[in-house]
Image: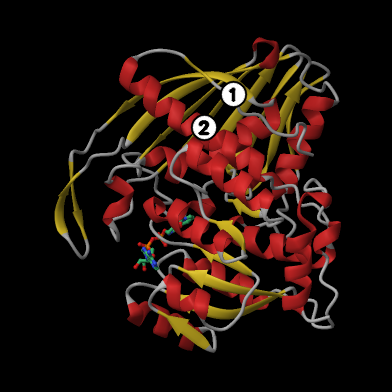
Amino acid sequence: MTRQQFLQQTAMAGAAVLLSSLEGFAISTESKKIRVAVIGCGSVSGSYLPHLTASKFVEVVSLCDIIEERAISRAKEFNVAHHYKHIDQMLAGVPFDMMITLTDMQEHGRLNKQALEAGKHVWSEKPMANSYKEGRELLDFAQSKNLRIWGAPAVVNSPQFAFMSKAIREGKLGRVASAHAHYGHTGPLWSSFFYEKLGGSLPDLGVYNIATLTGLLGPARSVMAMTTIVTPERTIDDKGKIKVVAEDNTQLIMEHDGGVLSNVQCGFNFFDPHGHQGKSEDSQTIQIWGTHGNMALAGYDWAPHGVDMVTHDHEQPQRFVPDPAGYVWQQGASVISESLVNGTEPLIAAEHALHVLEIIEASRKSGKNGKKVYLKSTFKFPVV
Ligand SMILES: NC(=O)c1ccc[n+]([C@@H]2O[C@H](COP(=O)([O-])OP(=O)(O)OC[C@H]3O[C@@H](n4cnc5c(N)ncnc54)[C@H](O)[C@@H]3O)[C@@H](O)[C@H]2O)c1
């Protein structure tokens, strides 16, 4: 059976295939590779493509960017045979199984929908859609077509996340009460979309910490936030001066089950000597406190260096899991491809990405009206 026939057949199987299991998707062709098409050949594609082209589960068949030179240049750099300047051309061009969306955030919902409509699986950079409603519709639509959609980030894949999750579940911290996370830098200047409507530090940066904290502490039931703009004007590389419309400074508090509270602070005005490439950051960015101990993640959750823990029976701080064991933040699409090939369910879940999206939207709302916002979405917990 060709891969095309396989995908058509699984699509026809419809609701009969359990969506909690990827067994039905396992690729039965000899090549055992997912053919992917990447849309958006800007900054982040420079991190994705080396990982994708090195994966034995992936064949990158085409690239697309509305700025055609970017698609041409990445195609040359990574030896990709086909490139297009419009999604319509890419969808009508060389066949593929999954689209990887790396465009401006505001384009994600529209492009992801178009890919699903064309029968493609989707891995999307964050956010997977531009509103919770749109994201829910995309997920429902994907399920109705027996397709899969996932959204970044991939923070639940790190061994440090697994260690923290296990420590909480085993009661190492006693009863968990409170947590904090932060992530920021002084803001990207290569594209204006980060500062436009539906951009902002929440979907670009806060998204990592929200995914980590909900992944560790469970789905949030409500959220309160304050959002501000600290730098009202920015000078963008190819546009000059622009007015900042989206928040660039946020603090939010989430309430999880059992009275647990966690807060996230994110922004585009945080001096950090490690800059946008904050991989060498070694200070603690996530802290969790319980009645018998506390633990903290050293480094950012997308580039963790280890977990520092103190407990009532071991008051000397200890660092655990200093090795990321191959985990890198840009691995999401490759990991998903491996799951699709092998028919195994990954840790990353669309329902979790959707929950994070609802929190982002609720934070914007709370920031505007000053009220607590109750959440309706949830996801399979614990993650690990
Ligand atoms: N840059 C990073 O280090 C980084 C890291 C993690 C995640 N991300 C996420 O990746 C996404 C892209 O960010 P970036 O920094 O690469 O932005 P970028 O501006 O460098 O690249 C985006 C590219 O998408 C193209 N594009 C926009 N609309 C398109 C459309 N309709 N069809 C085809 N191409 C289109 C643009 O021409 C541009 O080349 C965002 O969601 C961002 O949050 C970026």
Disc 2 is placed on an element classified as: helix
Residue at 67% across, 55% down: 145
Q: Quadrant of the N terminus?
A: bottom right
> Which numbered marker is on residue 36?
none
The residue that mark 1 highlights is 376
Left or right: 169 in relation to 310: right
**Amino acid of disc 2:** Glu
Q: Nearer the viewer, residue 285 or 10?
A: 10
Residue 85, horizontal then vertical, whole percent: 38, 77
The front one of 267 and 38 is 38
Q: Amino acid at mark 1?
A: Lys
Q: Is residue 217 above or below residue 96?
A: above
Residue in the picture at 47% in, 62% down: 102
| Residue 187 picture location, percent across and down | 33, 48
For the residues bearing labels 2 and 1, Cβ distance under 8 angstroms = yes
Residue at the front extreme, as displayed: 12
Residue situated in front as seen by the camera: 308 or 300: 300
| Left or right of 67 on screen, residue 290 | right
- The picture quadrant where one finds residue 214 is top right
Compared to residue 129, the image places residue 22 above or below, namely below
Tell me the quarter of the image containing the C terminus. top right
- The residue labelled by disc 2 is 358
**Nearer-N-terminus badge (2/1):** 2
| Residue 284 seen in render | no
Residue 237 x, y percent position in the rendering: 22, 63
Mark 2: few/some/many CA within 10 Å (<14, 14-19, 20+): many
